[in-house]
Image (spheres, coloured by chain):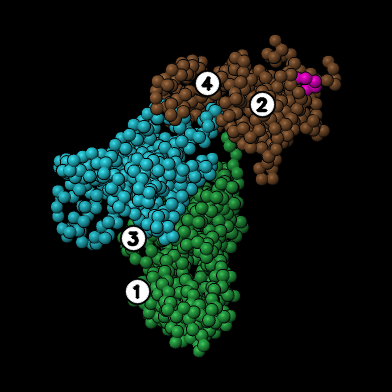
Chain colours: A green, B cyan, C brown
Amino acid sequence: MPLAIRHASTLLRVVGAIIGTTLAALMIVLAMGLAPASAQTTPSPSPSPSGDFTSTFTIGGLIRDGDTPLEGVEVRVEGDGFDEVGTTGADGRWVVPVPAQGKYTATLLPDTLPAGVAPRDPENITRDVNLATTNTVNVLFPTGAGTVVESNIGATILTRVIYGINFGLLLALGAIGISLIYGTTKLNNFAHGEMVTFGAVIFFLFSTVIGIPLVPAIAITLVLSAFTGYAQDAWLHKPLRRRGVGLVQAMIVTIGLSILVRYVILFFLGGNVQTLNTGLTENVNIGPATITLASLVSMGVSVVMLILVGLFLTRTRIGKATRAVSDNAQLAAASGINVDRIIRIVWVLAATLTGLSGILYGIFRQVNWNMGFQILLLLFAAVTLGGLGSAFGALVGSLIIGIVTEVSTVWIPNDLRYALALVILILVLLVRPQGVLGRKERVG
Amino acid sequence: MDWGQIFNSAAGELLSPVTAAYALAAIGIGVHFGYAGLLNFGQAGFMAIGAYAFVIPTLLFDFPLWAALLSSVFASILFAFLLGIPTLRLRADYLAIVTIASAEIVRYVVMTTGLTAITGGASGLSGFNSTFTALNPFADGSYGFGPWVFTANQLWVRVFGWSLVVLASILVFLLMRSPWGRVVKGIREDEDAVRSLGKNVYAYKMQALILGGVFGSLAGVIYVLPRSVQPTNYATTLTFFIWTMLLLGGAATILGPIVGAMIFAVLLTLSDGLIRGLISANIITFISSTQAGQVRFMIIGAVLMLLVIFRPQGIFGNKKELSFNV
Amino acid sequence: MSETMQTHPLVIGEVGPGCKKVDPIVVADNVTRTFGGLKAVDVVHVEIPRNAITALIGPNGAGKTTFFNLLTGFDKPNTGTWSFEGHSLARVPAFRVARKGMVRTFQLTKSLGRLSVLQNMLLGATKQPGENIFTALIKPLWRGREQDITAKAEDLLDRFKLLEKSSDYAASLSGGQRKLLEMARALMSDPVLIMLDEPMAGVNPALTQSLLGHVKQLKADGMSVLFVEHDMHMVRHISDWVIVMAEGRVVAEGPPDQVMNDPAVIDAYLGAHHDTDLGEMTGTIPVAAAPETATATATVPTETTAAETEREVEK
């Protein structure tokens, strides 16, 4: 069966290439990221962790007297059995990493303020902090006589834009998967969210529960993710195509699969939110913005991966064939392209990218059984915004969604930011029904 | 374990107001998908709109029952327009994504802390049932037999809910045998062909969307009448469950949605009761009782897949007239 | 015969691309439609004659179907105006175009598979009050009209030899029967102009003759017909007038036998599509005779074989 062997070897090459490049990218970015990180890490703000605080959730702020940053001021963060004190550095910043989202209180310790500086409202030096849907919350403690220290809106926006790009890039990995599958098979895959969850959960299992090092954990996760793509096409969708099952029908099958897989994951993982252990908890300053090292690495991996997918689609023979199938499957088949093989490769590629997206999303937020389903709609919105079936459109759509959801939290309540992203989707469809980069179609 | 108890509660589900609400919501998507070919994945949104538009005026402005019901209907008509105007001219899968997105927007908005004074935020609303129970025509006492023994209030909410279901079914029956139904079914088959015959396809699709949406909003009212409004209930999963019920019964049929909802509700209760019963009897030892609640959702997912693959026309559907491949 | 002037009873003045008709039913000006950078349709001026059978021919990708879509409101042009019986149709939605009496069929049949053949026919009818959602609920309000249109539908089905199929699902019909059904359905509304997009495509030879007969009958019944076709035999046999499109433009028009001798037409076909069956004409025109000088505005050659063709227009 030389054909089967060739088929299998192509798949192996695709998966191998993705894993190899992901890991290589990870190394490079880590090497680059760590160097500035060690130099730029906020001086001595982070307390010595008393427990396993490997999350990327932080509560922080800036304490100044007028325009002068105050060094050595302490803020105590408490909540849910957690108790930690953060100290401001030379730039007046303090950051306390916290283990999970939830409710905390932050209390300014007035004794640590320099002589001559007092809280503006000495009666009110405790703040309730609700870390609900973001990674970072800034807390303000105005000081000085009559001077109100406002949070630097520019820095806040910049930080949110960077997080938004990070979120957008990791969404793009998943959205391109949806887009490739839609392009070649015209199937809206509602089980795609579970592919995200799968990547995150498997990575959690190997990296945190079993505790093997980062790199092999990622490799294992991607191989298993790739296999789910293979399995979905080989055992479900190819037989359905053979039976002549309609697209709506196949879409509802993916809804059933989504429910099934989601509850299987819940069954084994449980309902709790889990935190990934990546060891990348330091903070990095980019100009006035502070982000976590993990986010920086995540962005690097996403960018490298997206460039490679772009090169794959435009430069390689299989990539060109993929685009030919997306354009017109019958014509592609007539011109000698093995459409079923291309679809199989697309499923494997999409599942691998989506698994990677899941790993990064798990690092960006946290891991839970429902995480993929929660962003499935954002993925669809990204794909639709960009224009159904266009891989580049999916990237643009994802970045729009990512940045909008993060930056909007500066002005609107946190719990409405996904709603805003979806409102934007609907508005874009009103003005430009074919999406930002989509093409119109002919009738008849 | 008490087998009698398990079967009793499953049989009780058959006529419960929740089942009536499911049935009515399924009739709604039956109009959308089964007859008009519209992919509405936002039925949970219509149900939420219906529930909140019923409850908020009742609580804030002391609306009488009829006015609150009207408010619910009007709100869903408005919502249908908002959904339909951007999407009904586009390809079918756009409607699917926009409806699912809109339903989520509704849920995010009613849950947001900023609107807690009006919507109750994440904890929802309660204490709105007095206008409904005040109109209860049944005298106090116990009615029914076997697993179906109800208090006067329980009977009243069931009679009300199932009456709406029956009325909706009659309405759908009358419409679908009429020339209006013919146009709508034609649109399901090929909207360009119907357009070429001089029918205003856009208007018909909008009418179908509104009709099914109104059913959805009334289902939302029935859903909350015996209890409180919980925003977490209106997640996308609810929509998917209603789709499962519709497909179980048969999409383009009159009785399909009702029977589908009944089977779904009974199976859900029965499977849950059985698994818990087996655990408490130490026959199944490897599943915790929390996990037992999850198994039935796995079953739902698997049933949905198998159903769509092997019996797409549902229980009542005509084998020839496969209610699929829109 | 005159060497300089080509005239025709349907035409005012000289015959040529964009020529004026004695009694045009459709007039289009400057209609363009671009897809991406490609101009799919670029029609400067064209008139469709009334009560005649007009064929719209051209190689694949000539823009025939797109032009059809534009005229009938199924697609929106970038520029242009066009009118039907003197009423402008620009920006009129497709369903209103159909209501004005300009009804089309599709290249890929659009029979409504899960409706019965009779239900398909009834959908074509107009003025059924039961199509309003409120009147629909009260049967007495629409029962009368339903009986009338059912009788009419059965008449038409009988004529198209589909009556015994009337309670079958349309999906169970053969490809040719679906074409017939689609044409019959279009007739339910008594159209003024019927536009057929490749009525012969995918129809078996046995049904072709009957389809040809039906198309001719439409004209006899007082309708105008515009159809897109690839098969030159068919075009020769039934059309009174032929309009040739290539690369989005009208490159020639005239009576069928003249047009098929037109170097511009041969060039358009052979240049773009060497293996196209040009019907009987391929044997008589040597390929070498296709001159490079043929341009979009070339007048048709003078020698015709008009005598042998049926010219119903002239009777």
Marks 2 and 1, how far apart at CA: 76 Å
Labels 4, 3: one chain: no
State the residue position of label 3.
A266
Q: Residue furthest top?
A: C315
Labels 3, 2: one chain: no
State the residue position of label 1.
A80
The N terminus of chain C lies in quadrant: top right
State the residue position of label 4.
C188
Is residue A2 highlighted in magenta? no
Q: Amino acid at mark 3?
A: Leu
Marks 4 and 1, how far apart at CA: 75 Å
Marks 3 and 1, how far apart at CA: 24 Å
Label 2 element class = strand
> Which residues are drawn in magenta?
C11-15
Nearer to us in this view, B14 or A382: B14
Q: Amino acid at mark 1?
A: Asp
Q: Amino acid at mark 4?
A: Met
Q: Amino acid at mark 2?
A: His
Task: Say which quarter of the image contains residue B28.
Answer: top left
Label 1 element class = loop
The residue at 49%/45% (across/down) is: B82
The C terminus of chain C lies in quadrant: top right
Instruction: Kindly report the secondary structure that dominates the magenta region of the rendered protein.
Output: loop
Q: Are marks 4 and 3 in contact (CB under 8 Å)?
A: no
- Crowding around mark 2 (Cα neighbors within 10 Å: few <14, some 14 to 19, many 20+) is few
State the residue position of label 2.
C87
Q: Are marks 3 and 2 in contact (CB under 8 Å)?
A: no
